Each structure stands twice: as C-alpha cells, then as structure tokens.
C-alpha cells in the first residue's frame, strides 16, 4: 500500500477530492493545501481518448502562458553561429562542440533549439536527446532560422505538450506563488491549446478528464464544463 506524507494526507482531508470543480474553485482548493519549503510547480494533467500508436492521433504542440511558467529556462542552441545565439540569450550554443558534450553525458539545459541546417548533424544524437524530451522539433518551434525569436518565446514561458504512450499529457502552468488569477488564466490557455490540437480522426469525447495539482499535492478534478466544448 502506497504511503503518503502527513502533508499529503492533510491536503486530502481538507476538501472533497471526489468532487469536480470549476477552474476557479479548483485553484482555490489547491491554495488551501499545505505548502512545502520550495515553490512547487502547478500542473494540469489530461487524460485523452486518442490512440498514441496512430500517427494521425499524436497530440503535440506548444503554447505561450499569459503569465509565464515561473521557471528559469536554460537554452542550448545547435547552430553554426553561436555568437548570435548567445547574444540572443542562449546559455550555450555551438554545433560539433555541443554535440560532443551531449554525447559525453552533459544535459545541463532545459530546451534545445536548432537551425534547420544544424539538424542534419543533431539527428545523430537523437538517441540521447529523444528519451529526455530534449530533441529539437519543428512542431514545437525549436527547429527554426529565427533563433532569437525562439529563445525569447521559450524564456517568456512558452510550454510544450506531448501525449505519452498512455494517452496522458502533463503540463506545468506556473508556481504556487502565482496569484489565483494567474494560474486560472494559464490553465485556460493550456486547455484551449490542447483542445484545438484535437486530431480530426478522433470522434466523440476527446478530453476524458483533467486534474490540477502541485508538485507534492493530490490532484483536484476539474469539471468537464471547462473543456467539454472540445
């Protein structure tokens, strides 16, 4: 039997977690949970009805958060012009030298961006970057000639979402230190983005359920009225 901390048990007893709540109310329930010593990430978790094994049902994309993610994003750019990337705000940039570091086990970055030309080489380390979710991808806006724009977007709080093999998506939408209004508006932006990413081949219900949680808290069920239009 799984054991939970005293903090977690206190959270579960503070509200009825079998009930579904509007986004506004779900955020208020979350705010009542005991806090940790660190600023927890607030996450939305989605259960979809898609079949991820079907290529036409892969749900993946990016969306900006109105109030940012609250996270400091370290950017690595694979490019033949590292000086320009560093000037645009990247922490690290280069091509062969950066690829060598990655192959040796260095992964001290949160997002990898690449120019289209550089991708010809970067594909050779896909086996390292792919399992970590760090492989640049055109669909997520991380393969582009507009390096400065891509760096600005990810540092401003653009988040990526991708359905996993169990048809689930988890997206960080802020920190517990955010105001309730900021969390609600960020959550609405993510729900809308994932809703609009609905594959054409999916009929009937698309978003099965959604829950809101913090790093160390139980999940709060979000009412279907917040997403059933998708």
Image (cartoon, rainbow, N blue to C red):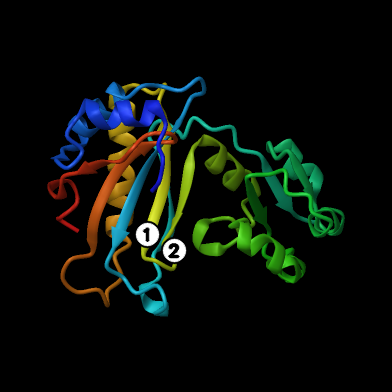
Residue nearest the viewer, comparing 116 with 70: 70
Q: Identify the disc placed on residue 34.
A: none
Q: Is residue 170 left or right of residue 209?
A: right
x and y percentages locating residue 26 in the rendered image:
22, 34
- Considering the image in quadrants, where does the C terminus appear? bottom left
x and y percentages locating residue 73 in the rendered image:
60, 37
Q: Callout 2: few (<14), some (14-19), or many (20+) C-alpha neighbours within 10 Å?
A: some
The reply to whether dot 1 and dot 2 touch (C-beta < 8 Å) is: yes
Q: Identify the disc placed on residue 164.
A: 2
Residue nearest the viewer, comparing 39 with 174: 39
Residue 144 seen in this snapshot: no
Q: Identify the disc placed on residue 168.
A: 1
Residue 192 seen in this snapshot: yes
Q: Is residue 103 left or right of residue 155?
A: right
Q: Is residue 187 left or right of residue 81?
A: left
Q: Quadrant of residue 155?
A: top right
State the SS at label 1.
strand
* Residue at image point 62% right, 62% down: 131
x and y percentages locating residue 191 in the rendered image:
29, 48
x and y percentages locating residue 58 in the rendered image:
40, 70
Q: Is residue 10 left or right of residue 73?
A: left
Question: Number of labelled discs?
Answer: 2
Rounded to the nearest angstrom, the CA distance separating label 1 from label 2 is: 5 Å
197 vs 70: above or below: below
99 vs 170: above or below: below
Q: Callout 1: few (<14), some (14-19), or many (20+) C-alpha neighbours within 10 Å?
A: many
* Residue at image point 58% right, 57% down: 133
């Amino acid at each position: 039997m799984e054991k939970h901390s005293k903090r977690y048990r206190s959270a579960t007893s503070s509200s009825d977690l079998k009930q579904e709540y509007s986004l506004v109310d779900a955020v208020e329930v979350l705010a009542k949970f005991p806090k940790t010593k660190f600023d927890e990430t607030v996450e939305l978790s989605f259960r979809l009805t898609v079949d991820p094994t079907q290529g036409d049902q892969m749900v993946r994309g990016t969306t900006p958060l109105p109030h940012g993610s609250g996270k400091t994003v370290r950017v690595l750019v694979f490019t033949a012009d590292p000086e320009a990337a560093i000037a645009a705000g990247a922490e690290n940039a280069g091509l062969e030298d950066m690829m060598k570091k990655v192959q040796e086990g260095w992964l001290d970055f949160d997002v990898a961006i690449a120019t289209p030309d550089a991708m010809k080489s970067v594909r050779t380390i896909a086996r390292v970057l792919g399992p970590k979710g760090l492989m640049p991808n055109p669909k997520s806006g991380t393969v582009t000639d507009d390096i400065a724009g891509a760096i600005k977007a990810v540092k401003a709080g653009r988040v990526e979402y991708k359905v996993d093999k169990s048809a689930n998506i988890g997206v960080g939408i802020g920190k517990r230190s955010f105001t309730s209004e900021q969390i609600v508006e960020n959550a609405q932006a993510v729900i809308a983005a994932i809703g609009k990413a609905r594959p054409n081949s999916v009929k009937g219900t698309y978003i099965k359920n959604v829950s809101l949680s913090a790093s160390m808290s139980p999940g709060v069920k979000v009412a279907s009225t917040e997403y059933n239009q998708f």
